[in-house]
Image (tube, helix red, strand yellow):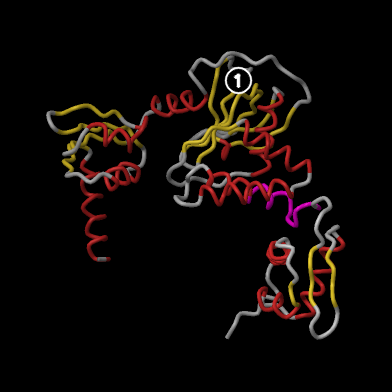
Amino acid sequence: MRPNLDSMNTSARMLRLLSLLQTHRYWPGGELSERLEVSPRTLRRDIDRLRDLGYHVDAVRGVAGGYQLRAGGSLPPLLLEDDEAVAIAVGLRTSAAGAVSGLEETSVQALTKVIALMPPRLRRRMDALRSQSDNLVWGGGPAIDADVLTTLAQACRDDEPLTFGYTARGSERTERRVEPHRLVSIGRRWYLVAYDRDRQDWRSFRVDRIADAATTGQRFRPRELPAEDALTFVQAGIRSMPQRYAVRVRLATAVAAVQDVVGQWGEVTPDGDRALLEMNVDDLAWPVMVLARLDADVEVESPPELRDLLVRTGERFSRAG
């Protein structure tokens, strides 16, 4: 039995309808109803909603009737709530950056269409997010507030001081006054690099721990960041933090092969005809993922927890095979 989608999210269904109509071909009403899996009555209501939003949809009545989107004219606003539109654009931007292999070109094309359909206020938010952030994608991370993220991006772009509440790990909330510099995305976590006015020093703040971000309406003269760039600054801060595990692994492969996978998240040195990998991590899932990507025999020196986790993971995969 085919699912009844009359009750599906209206915005999502209308976005699908608009996507079909934007081919500018003539669509018989029955074919559109079948494509969307809705009744002719629901289709007529959706067409009326598009017209209310400014889309010029021509209709031919009767048994052989149908619909066609008139060519030309300006594009009305996107049929999504503000947060939904920003979330879609952020997701497409991540895919375009290579987070999902094979989707880069398609994501760029889709992102261009989505931003073109955005009203000016949302386009400015996405322009700020794109221009004021650096990305290094891997792993998973906590959810963040899209409004907070775009507020921070706009403040970085406009050199506007920020105030927000910040809850560091194991600490109580504190109120911060900062001069925002740049947003950095690492491993699905977002960080704000900023100069903390009260502590008179540069800091990186995890965006998922920021609340009630607000701009002041003022301007500041940007300071010189004590690092090559914001991404390097955040990575150095992460490496300097006390970590739970000191990983030391020998691999029967070339140093270059390991370095290509590890990047700046570990130290790789020659060990005879092998490579020695050292990493400091809080979570052993990352070194397991690194080792799984390398086609090489592995000898774990430390910690023993990593050795045990590799054994359990291998046994699990063997059962699946």
Residue 281 image position (x, y, % from top left): 34, 36
Going by the image, does 253 lie left or right of 3? left
Pointer 1: what residue? Answer: 196
Question: Is residue 37 visible to us here?
Answer: yes
As shown in the figure, which amino acid type bears the numbered disc 1? Asp
- x 75%, y 53%: residue: 78
Relative vertical location of residue 94 with respect to residue 218 in this rendering, above or below: below
Residue 128 image position (x, y, % from top left): 67, 34
Q: Which residue is at the front of the view, 207 or 293?
A: 293
Based on the displayed image, in which of its 4 quarters is residue 138 positioned? top left
Going by the image, does 231 lie left or right of 256? right
- x 61%, y 79%: residue: 3
The magenta stretch spans which residues? 76-88
Q: Which residue is at the front of the view, 22 or 224?
A: 22
Question: Is residue 11 visible to us here?
Answer: no
Going by the image, does 139 lie left or right of 184? left
Assign the N terminus to one quadrant of the image.
Answer: bottom right
